[in-house]
Image: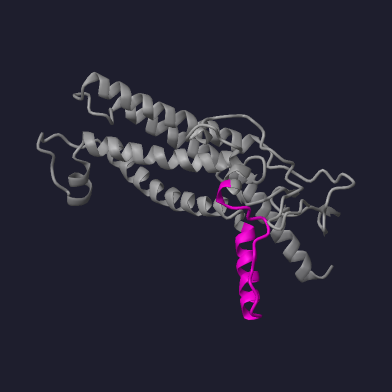
Amino acid sequence: MDAVELARVVLGRALDNFMRGLGIALLVLGTLLVIFITYVYFSVPLLNPGFPVYVQLGTTSLGLWILFNILFNWWYCYSTSPGHPSHEKGKYAPKMCHKCNAPKPLRCHHCSVCGKCVLAMDHHCPWMANCVGFYNYRYFYLFLVYMCSGCVFCVAVISASHPIIDVTFYGKIPASGRVMPGSVVFVFIVTVSVSIAVGILLAWHTYLVMSAQTTIEFYKNRSRRGARVHRGEVFVNEFDMGRRKNWQSVFGPQRAFLSWTLPTTRRRDGDGETWGLVRGQVV
């Protein structure tokens, strides 16, 4: 091994170790931020105490439901293994992972941070301190849904209960003459920023679910599509079974409207190694 290769290996391992440490730090930081916002909601409070009791109870109940789902999906995405190849004989694995020195099934990719191959790997998420893959993708997606919903909820509550727009953007003094609590302004700015960022990410992953792609596959498919177009051919994503079936592949068949949003510990159907293809084959 020459000096350049040795330096590349050392830097790669240092980066992987940094990402592991960063994941735990961001997980703790995010949890503390959620706890702080919850504390401000009840202590300041964010909701105007002058509202009718039924409005306060209904709004707070909705907020607690969203909070529960944020923490539930966050924890399960962190603690659930994304899935790793079984290396069983008879499984269809067209490639070999040279880092694991083992067969690599379809849609499987090696994560250098985790040091393992991950089934249907989407990406390694520092905020989850885990890879997002076959078995925990549902929790990741629902975390995005409820985190975005929670931020929008806080923005709506603050806007309805405080002259936050005038104070934050126009520097106006409230008619009451009372100073706006700094914690309220902080929560408002944070939740507006996070709702925009997470909302964009949620829209992106909704597209990926509907089109039966992971983030890694999207970029690979884009290059393949370009190559096919250049040759005058048509590119077909062989895993795309249609929006309904693609959605059910992740969330399972749903009998009731929006039942996919409910918290569940039910394991995702399938093994993450064999896939139905648009041409009717199963590999």
Residue 25 visible in the snapshot: no
The picture places residue 270, in percent across and down from the top left corner, at: 72, 40
* Residue at position x 78%, y 70% in the image: 3
The picture places residue 60, in percent across and down from the top left corner, at: 34, 25
Viewer-side residue, 7 vs 36 = 36
Question: In the shown orientation, is residue 279 left or right of residue 194?
Answer: right
Question: In the shown orientation, is residue 140 left or right of residue 180?
Answer: right
Query: Which image quarter: residue 42?
Result: top left
Residue 126 shown in magenta: no
Viewer-side residue, 221 vs 46 = 221
Answer above or below: position of 65 versus 116. Answer: above
Residue 226 shown in magenta: yes
Viewer-side residue, 258 vs 204 = 258
Q: How is the image coloured?
A: one colour
Residue 58 visible in the snapshot: yes
* Residue at position x 54%, y 35% in the image: 73
Answer above or below: position of 261 versus 278. Answer: above
Answer above or below: position of 279 versus 153. Answer: below
Count of marks placed on residues = 0
The picture places residue 259, in percent across and down from the top left corner, at: 51, 32
* Residue at position x 22%, y 24% in the image: 49
Viewer-side residue, 277 vs 266 = 277
Query: Which image quarter: residue 214?
Result: bottom right
Screen quadrant of the N terminus: bottom right
The picture places residue 264, in percent across and down from the top left corner, at: 58, 29
* Residue reaching furthest to the right: 89
State which region is magenta: 216-244
Question: In the shown orientation, is residue 209 left or right of residue 228?
Answer: left
